[in-house]
Amino acid sequence: MCVDVVTVPDPESVRYRTHLDLATTSTAHHAALVQRLLELGATPADIGQGDVPWTVMADPEGNVFCVLEPREVYRDTGPIATVVVNCEDPRAMAAFWGEATDWTVHEVTDEHARLRSAAGVGPYLELLRVPGPITVQSRIHLDLLPSPGDDQGAEVERLRGLGATDLDVGQGDVPWACLRDVEGNDFCVLRPH
């Protein structure tokens, strides 16, 4: 998984529906990572989480992320444990994203779903139930990269068949396609290499 950071004209000022959770391997690692992030300009964040075993932080531009306490499920994910997407219906979202990415659904309930690459490597995609529909655009989104030799247009059509819809964010003539998933979360389909 790659993380791209791009410039956007607007500051983070809304509660968005997607964030990253960082993995730790021990209590000492958790403390050291939080300290390092503070030194890099992150700040503690209160999003109403209450008393939880993980640390909620914001990067220098206000993007919220979490530093998780050590959890066995994330021991082999690398530094990013999971990409978390809030949604109304984790079951429907797991069905869409499982088909869209060909990732394995490891757990699905009415409250939560967890998917991961069929190869069993990298971070998880977690879908957490929260009430209410999307009311704001998120600054964090997924980009899908078709396999080498696949046709981008055919992949976009396949995703539309799964329930994705076209999205115009003023992107103009770009080499990627902008879509929304079944709950309106933005994502892009890149051109295969």
Image: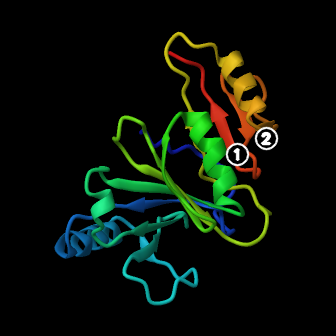
Q: Position of residue 35 (x, y in %)?
A: 27, 73
Check disc 1 and report its element: helix, strand or loop: strand
Q: Which residue is depicted at the point 63% across and 66% down?
A: 110
Whether residue 188 is situated above or below residue 78 in the rendered picture: above
Q: Which residue is depicted at the point 65% across and 18% down?
A: 152
Check disc 2 and report its element: helix, strand or loop: loop
Report the coloring of the rendering: rainbow
Q: Which residue is mark 2?
A: 169
Mark 2 → mark 1, Cα distance in angstroms = 10 Å
Q: Name the one closer to the observer, 172 or 115.
A: 115
Nearest to viewer (mark 2 / mark 1)? 1
Are the residues flagged by discs 2 and 1 in contact, CB closer than 8 Å?
yes
Which of disc 1 and disc 2 is earlier in sequence? 2
Q: Which residue is depicted at the point 65% across and 55% down?
A: 91
Q: Position of residue 75 (x, y in %)?
A: 26, 57
Instruction: Identify which amino acid the numbered label 1 is placed on.
Output: Asp
- Quarter in which the N terminus is drawn: top left
Residue 9 can be seen, yes or no:
no
Instruction: Identify which amino acid the numbered label 2 is placed on.
Output: Val
Q: Is residue 149 left or right of residue 71?
A: right
